[in-house]
C-alpha cells in the first residue's frame, strides 16, 4: 500500500509525456494540420429552395464578394468588390502561381529537395512544423502549402524560387501590377497579418483565375486528405467545399483575427469554370456558405459555349498575287459565356474582306467571325492568312509567259 502514491505519480508522468509527444513538432504520433484559427471543422451548408435568379440579391455574410467566370474573366456577381481588406492565407494564391510557373519553366522540379531555413521554420500560424535544415521535396511542400495552408512550407518554397522571402514578395507585387491588381500590395508570402498587406475580392478573383488555369494546381487543390513524413503528419484540406460541393476544384482559404474568414473557391461543371471569392466573413459557415451561394447562382444561370464557325471555306482569291488563291485559317471555336435563357438566341456571322490584294503576309486579317446574342455582339474572332503571297512584278509576268511558251 505504501508504494501506491509512487505508482500513481508514475502513471501521471507517462500520460503527460505521451501527451507532449503527440502534440510536439517532433511528435511520434500523427500530427493533424489545420489552418490557423480555423474553427470550421463541421460545416453546415445552408440549402436554399432554389438558386437566385439574375437580378436577385444574395444574402452573403461578408464584407465583400465576387463571382467570376474563369475563361472570359467576366464578373457575374459582386458585392463591394473593390474594398481593400487583409487577405489572410488566400495570399498564397499568388505565391502558388509563381511557384508553379517556376516548375513549368523548368526552374524547379517536383522531386527537387528543399532545405528549410531558420526563417521558414520560424513561421507562425498554420504549419507542418518544419525544423531548420529539414529537407522535403517541392512536391511535399506543395501538398502542405495547398492542402493545409502551411506557412513554413510556403516560405521554404518562396526562398527556393527567389533566394529570400523578401525577393519573392517583390516578384509577387510585380506580377500583381502586370495582372491589373491595382488595389493589392503584399508584405509577405503567407498572408499573416501585416500593415499594408491588402487586397480586394476582385483582385483575388483575378489571380485565382490565373492559377486555376494551370492543371498542376488541381493535383493538390482537389485532395481532401494526404499525409507527410511516412504518415506521421496528416493533412486535411482547409477548403471544405472540396469534399462537399460537386465540381469543386480548389482553391484557398484564409483566416486571421484581422482578416476574418476568407475563401477563394473554384468549381467547374459542363465546361463552365467559376471562381467565388468571400472576404471577411464572420465564421467558416459564412465563407463556405457564401461561396456555395455564389457558385450555385453561376451554375444555375450561366452556360459556356464553344461556337464553331459554320463555313468550311479554306481559301480566298487574291488580286495581283503570284498565287491566285491564299490559304486561310479559321478560328477553331469562339468561346461564349451566356445566360442559359439566351442560348437559343446565339447566331453567327462570317465576313471576308473583299478584293484581297497582294502582297499578303502570313497572319494578316482577311475576315471575321462575329457571334451575336440576339442583336447584341458577344464576340469577334479574326480569320487570318495561313501563308504569305507576294505581289506580281514585271519579271514574274515575263517568266510566266516564257514558261507558258515552253509548255505549249
Image (tube, grey):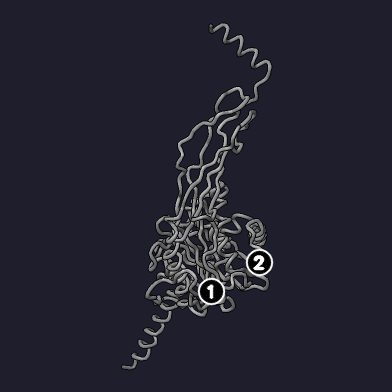
Name the foreground residue: 382 vs 177. Answer: 382
Question: Which residue has dot 2 on it?
Answer: 183
Name the foreground residue: 166 vs 387. Answer: 387
Name the foreground residue: 179 vs 87. Answer: 179
Image quadrant occupied by the N terminus: bottom left
Can you name the residue that lies furthest to the left here?
1
The relative height of residue 333 versus residue 144 in the rendered view (above or below) is above
Mark 1 nearby-residue class (10 Å; few <14, some 14–19, many ≥20): many
| 112 left or right of 14 in image | right
Whole-angstrom CA distance, mark 2 to mark 1, is 20 Å
Helix, strand or loop status at disc 2: loop
Q: Where is residue 153 in the image (x, y as percent from the top left)?
A: 53, 63
Identify the residue shown where x is 67% and y is 20%.
393
Q: Where is residue 42 in the image (x, y as percent from the top left)?
A: 40, 77
| 31 left or right of 112 in image | left
Name the foreground residue: 266 vs 272. Answer: 272
Amino acid at each position: 500500500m505504501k508504494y501506491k502514491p509512487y505508482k500513481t505519480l508514475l502513471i501521471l508522468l507517462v500520460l503527460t509525456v505521451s501527451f507532449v509527444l503527440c502534440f510536439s513538432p517532433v511528435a511520434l504520433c500523427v500530427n493533424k494540420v489545420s489552418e490557423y484559427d480555423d474553427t470550421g471543422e463541421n460545416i453546415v451548408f445552408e440549402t436554399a429552395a432554389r438558386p437566385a435568379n439574375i437580378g436577385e440579391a444574395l444574402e452573403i455574410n461578408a464584407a465583400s464578394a465576387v463571382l467570376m467566370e474563369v475563361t472570359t474573366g467576366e464578373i457575374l456577381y459582386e458585392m463591394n468588390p473593390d474594398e481593400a481588406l487583409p487577405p489572410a492565407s488566400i495570399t498564397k494564391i499568388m505565391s502558388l502561381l509563381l511557384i508553379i510557373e517556376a516548375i513549368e519553366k523548368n526552374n524547379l522540379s517536383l522531386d527537387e529537395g528543399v532545405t528549410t531555413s531558420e526563417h521558414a521554420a520560424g513561421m507562425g500560424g498554420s504549419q507542418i512544423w518544419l525544423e531548420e535544415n529539414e529537407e522535403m521535396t517541392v512536391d511535399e511542400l506543395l501538398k502542405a502549402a495547398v492542402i493545409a495552408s502551411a506557412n513554413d512550407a510556403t516560405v521554404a518554397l518562396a526562398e527556393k524560387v527567389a533566394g529570400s522571402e523578401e525577393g519573392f514578395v517583390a516578384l509577387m507585387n510585380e506580377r500583381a501590377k502586370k495582372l491589373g491588381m491595382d488595389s493589392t500590395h503584399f508584405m509577405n508570402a503567407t498572408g499573416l497579418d501585416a500593415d499594408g498587406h491588402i487586397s480586394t475580392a476582385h483582385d483575388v478573383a483575378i489571380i485565382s483565375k490565373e492559377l486555376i488555369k494551370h492543371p498542376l494546381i488541381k493535383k493538390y487543390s482537389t485532395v481532401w486528405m494526404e499525409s507527410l513524413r511516412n504518415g506521421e503528419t496528416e493533412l486535411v484540406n482547409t477548403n471544405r467545399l472540396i469534399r462537399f460541393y460537386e465540381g469543386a476544384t480548389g482553391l484557398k482559404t484564409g483566416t486571421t483575427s484581422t482578416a476574418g474568414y476568407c475563401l477563394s473557391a473554384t468549381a467547374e461543371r459542363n465546361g463552365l469554370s467559376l471562381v467565388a471569392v468571400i472576404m471577411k466573413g464572420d465564421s467558416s459557415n459564412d465563407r463556405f456558405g457564401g461561396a456555395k451561394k455564389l457558385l450555385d447562382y453561376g451554375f444555375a444561370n450561366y452556360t459556356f459555349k464553344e461556337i464553331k464557325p459554320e463555313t468550311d471555306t479554306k481559301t480566298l482569291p487574291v488580286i495581283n498575287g503570284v498565287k491566285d488563291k491564299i490559304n486561310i485559317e479559321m478560328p477553331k471555336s469562339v468561346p461564349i459565356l451566356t445566360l442559359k435563357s439566351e442560348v437559343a438566341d446565339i447566331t453567327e456571322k462570317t465576313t471576308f474582306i473583299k478584293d484581297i490584294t497582294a502582297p499578303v503576309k502570313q497572319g494578316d486579317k482577311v475576315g471575321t467571325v462575329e457571334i451575336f446574342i440576339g442583336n447584341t455582339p458577344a464576340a469577334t474572332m479574326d480569320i487570318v492568312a495561313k501563308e504569305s503571297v507576294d505581289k506580281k512584278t514585271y519579271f514574274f509576268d515575263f517568266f510566266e509567259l516564257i514558261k507558258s511558251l515552253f509548255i505549249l
